Amino acid sequence: MNPYILSTLLFGLGLGTTLTFASSHWLLAWMGLEMNTLAIIPLMAQHHHPRAVEATTKYFLTQATGAAMLLFASTTNAWLTGQWDIQQMSHPLPVTMVTLALALKVGLAPLHSWLPEVIQGLDLTTGLILSTWQKLAPFALLLQVQPTNTTLLVTLGLASTLVGGWGGLNQTQLRKILAYSSIAHLGWMILVVQYSPSLTILALLTYIIMTLSTFLVFKLNSSTTINALATSWAKAPALTSLTPLLLLSLGGLPPLTGFMPKWLILQELAKQELASTATFAALTALLSLYFYLRLSYAMALTMSPNNTAGTTPWRLPSSQITLPLAVSTSATLLLLPLTPAATALLTL
């Protein structure tokens, strides 16, 4: 892609998200979300491949539906209360509609069906943008609206953690596994959004760091299936030994960074006397952990076939800049001791 066009599209992505962050009026927020969608569509369709075009079409239709629902909800709110301000959502009907519209936009279960299919049709870089940057603007709106419908949020959260764990069990494609991982992590964030918005921000930031490092590892190895992971030891042995730890961090095992948000969210749910919800969420995390262990096993404990047909393919050295990978990997593995500092910052 032409670098000028690419820089314009990336600028559009940044501007759309910033506009949604900065807006207090529903129309401006909606405009920011639309800019976001329109800026990423050429990035998704840049490889003129049927899968990419199909994924782009699915994404466009889904996001357009979510945006239309959001606009309808904000108009309904203005009609019922006379307010266009995002933080003045007082009537339960538009609040519920906005929550569902934003759930569709980020891919929360049961509105998640588009996400694995779309990410599977994209290359790893665009999939990374879709899994991380594109979640920021909807979450900013969700945190401003502060929905109070406990039943809806807990249902969305538990359904997402369950579907995110269950859906990934039978997959062999890494992008689909990461999509289901994304659904499960978003479920954890939604569970706690009404009790501790700052904790949702912490969970979102740690999710972005962990997903960034995982996508960059797969991009460095040019891996898109579980079987392709077995050949990565020949290319980057040190990184191959660290990657299982990255995956276990995504699964939320101590003493890695991924344990921090899960631990604090379970603690918050217990404080709110939602012990059964916390127990169910913790059990669904085991499902996700199973497929992260599968990936770890394929990467660290299996050798690719050494016969003539299956000899490790010759690979040229990667031209990828490895500094972002090094920084995100260190953050994914080593941030747990900073939990007290993180919680102190969030309570300011």
Image: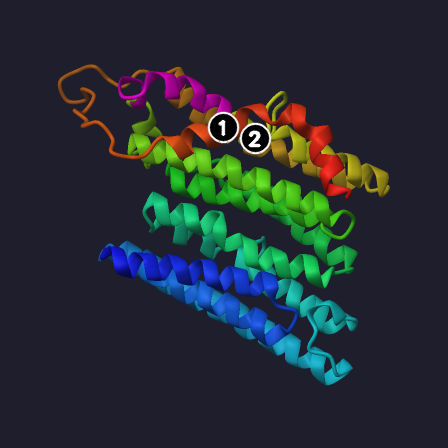
Q: Secondary structure at mark 1?
A: helix
Q: Residue at x 57, y 73 (%)?
A: 28
Residue 281 shown left or right of residue 239 in the figure: right
Residue highlighted by disc 1: 247
Q: Is residue 50 above or below residue 241?
A: below
Residue highlighted by disc 2: 251
Task: Give the residue type that dot 1 points to.
Answer: Leu
Q: Is residue 63 visible?
A: yes
Q: Residue at x 76, y 71 (%)?
A: 88
Q: Secondary structure at mark 2?
A: helix
Separation (CA) of disc 2 from disc 1: 6 Å
Task: Give the residue type that dot 2 points to.
Answer: Gly
Q: Position of residue 140 (x, y in %)?
A: 62, 57
**Is residue 13 found inside the magenta-colored segment of the image?**
no
Q: Position of residue 122 (x, y in %)?
A: 34, 50
Mark 2 and mark 1 in contact? Answer it, CB < 8 Å.
Answer: yes
